[in-house]
Image: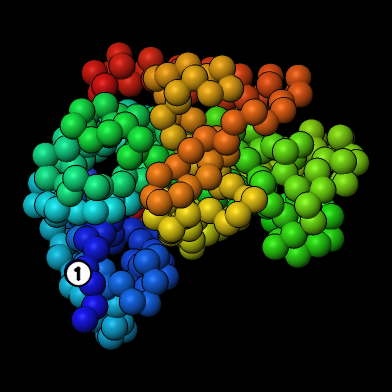
């Protein structure tokens, strides 16, 4: 007999990211081939018709792991009993905008959804925010869900993590599988700090192996930090398939765990680790065991890294102040 379906809520379900993400969840890529999933899809009312078309396509895939699909525009109903919630639905930025320019437009979405999760989600719910500005939207959702443990709210920096991994592999001329222990610190924004010093290539410190500080500072960092904007410039729309992939990978890691000796970048509520006081949601190196993440402790940070991390955390605190003054938290 197969286990009971896991209820997976996804918001922004008629949007670009979800056109890739939903099919991968439904096919068993998130929870494995033996675990049925029930999709709970949230959209705004005008997008429900388009979402019906997406559901027709999900039906037409005849996935054996898809136990059911429910759609709606009422978060209180869609989130009822959900175990996993992927909050993707929010407006993307367009050319020339920074992600923080979306705070006012998107912030309110996450107050309502935080409250609905608080009142209706299952006790074991895990909430991952992809919609931008992801870290601060996750902070808003968390702050509006006082009955859910804070550690159940994450934001997505796995896309940045994967971007950093791909850049390091290309520079070293190795397969991406050789690159481990990548960390994105801070905000999912242009201030994020991709750490080449604690990353490893073939088990050796990546920065030592690459031995090119100028490349790290002037090429690697800005390429990763500005990759989202480069994609918008080239594609005319923000990253979608790679964002869906990262959203899936983050949740799969959070449920299933990290590989021995490696970690993943996850934006989680700050707890004082690495001198970053509580109050914001910052990306850290995390290991996961039995569905619980732990921030990796005692990594060495050189002065260069420390200054970059501090700048990104300062930006998170500014965003926190902005949403406080907007009355969102
Ligand atoms: P999109 O515009 O194609 O889709 C967004 C969908 O969200 C739309 O269908 C819209 O109707 C829906 N939506 C809006 N308000 C909603 C609400 N209150 N409830 C439910 N649904 C709602 O955008 P996209 O390309 O899918 O991107 C979605 C978000 O993800 C954007 O904010 C984008 O910037 C962000 N993003 C984040 C990352 C990351 O790494 N964190 C990467 C890529 C994109
Ligand atoms: C990305 O990193 O690709 C997304 O956050 C989209 C964006 O606005 O950059």
Q: Foreground residue, 38 or 88? A: 38
Determine the residue positioned at 52% across, 35% down.
295
Determine the residue positioned at 43% across, 58% down.
256
Q: Residues within 10 Å of mark 1 (few under 14, many from 20)?
A: few
Name the quarter where the C terminus is drawn.
top left
23 with respect to 51 (left or right): right
Q: Quadrant of residue 40?
A: bottom left
Q: Position of residue 62 (x, y in %)?
A: 28, 85
Determine the residue positioned at 61% across, 19% down.
310
Colour scheme of the rendered structure: rainbow
Name the quarter where the N terminus is drawn.
bottom left
Tell whether circle 1 marks a residue whose Cβ is less than 8 angstroms from ligand 1. Answer: no
Compared to residue 30, the image places residue 226 above or below, namely: above
Secondary structure beneath dot 1 equals loop
Q: Position of residue 226 (x, y in %)?
A: 63, 41
Residue 66 appearing in the image: no
207 with respect to 250 (left or right): right
Residue 217 appearing in the image: yes
Q: Residue furthest right?
A: 211
Q: Foreground residue, 304 or 6? A: 6
Q: Quadrant of residue 274?
A: top right
**Total label count?**
1
Q: Position of residue 46 (x, y in %)?
A: 17, 56
Residue beneath disc 1:
4
Determine the residue positioned at 82% across, 48% down.
204
Compared to residue 205, the image places residue 169 above or below, namely: below
Q: Position of residue 44 (x, y in %)?
A: 19, 51
């Amino acid at each position: 007999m197969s286990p009971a379906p896991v209820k997976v809520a996804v918001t922004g379900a008629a949007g670009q990211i979800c056109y890739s993400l939903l099919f991968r969840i439904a096919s068993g890529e998130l929870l494995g081939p033996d675990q049925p999933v029930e999709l709970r899809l949230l959209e705004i009312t005008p997008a429900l018709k388009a979402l019906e078309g997406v559901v027709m396509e999900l039906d037409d895939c005849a996935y054996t792991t898809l136990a059911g699909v429910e759609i709606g525009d009422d978060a209180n109903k869609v989130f009822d009993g959900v175990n996993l919630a992927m909050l993707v639905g929010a407006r993307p930025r367009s050319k020339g905008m920074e992600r923080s320019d979306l705070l006012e437009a998107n912030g309110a979405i996450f107050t309502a959804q935080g409250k609905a999760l608080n009142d209706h989600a299952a006790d074991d719910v895990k909430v991952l925010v992809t919609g931008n500005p992801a870290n601060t939207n996750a902070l808003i959702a968390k702050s509006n869900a006082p009955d859910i443990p804070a550690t159940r709210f994450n934001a997505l920096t796995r896309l940045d993590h994967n971007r950093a991994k791909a850049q390091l592999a290309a520079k070293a001329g190795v397969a991406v599988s050789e690159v481990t222990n990548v960390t994105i610190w801070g905000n999912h924004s242009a201030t994020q700090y991709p750490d080449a010093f604690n990353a490893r290539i073939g088990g050796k410190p990546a920065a030592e192996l690459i031995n090119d500080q100028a490349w790290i500072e002037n090429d690697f960092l800005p390429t990763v930090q500005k990759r989202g904007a480069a994609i918008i410039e080239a594609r005319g729309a923000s990253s979608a398939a790679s964002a869906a992939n990262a959203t899936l990978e983050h949740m799969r890691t959070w449920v299933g765990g990290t590989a021995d000796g490696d970690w993943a970048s996850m934006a989680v509520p700050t707890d004082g680790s690495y001198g970053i006081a509580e109050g914001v949601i910052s990306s850290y190196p995390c290991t996961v065991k039995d569905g619980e993440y732990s921030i990796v402790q005692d990594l060495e940070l050189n002065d260069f890294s420390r200054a970059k991390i501090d700048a990104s955390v300062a930006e998170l605190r500014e965003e926190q102040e902005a949403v406080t003054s907007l009355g969102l938290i």
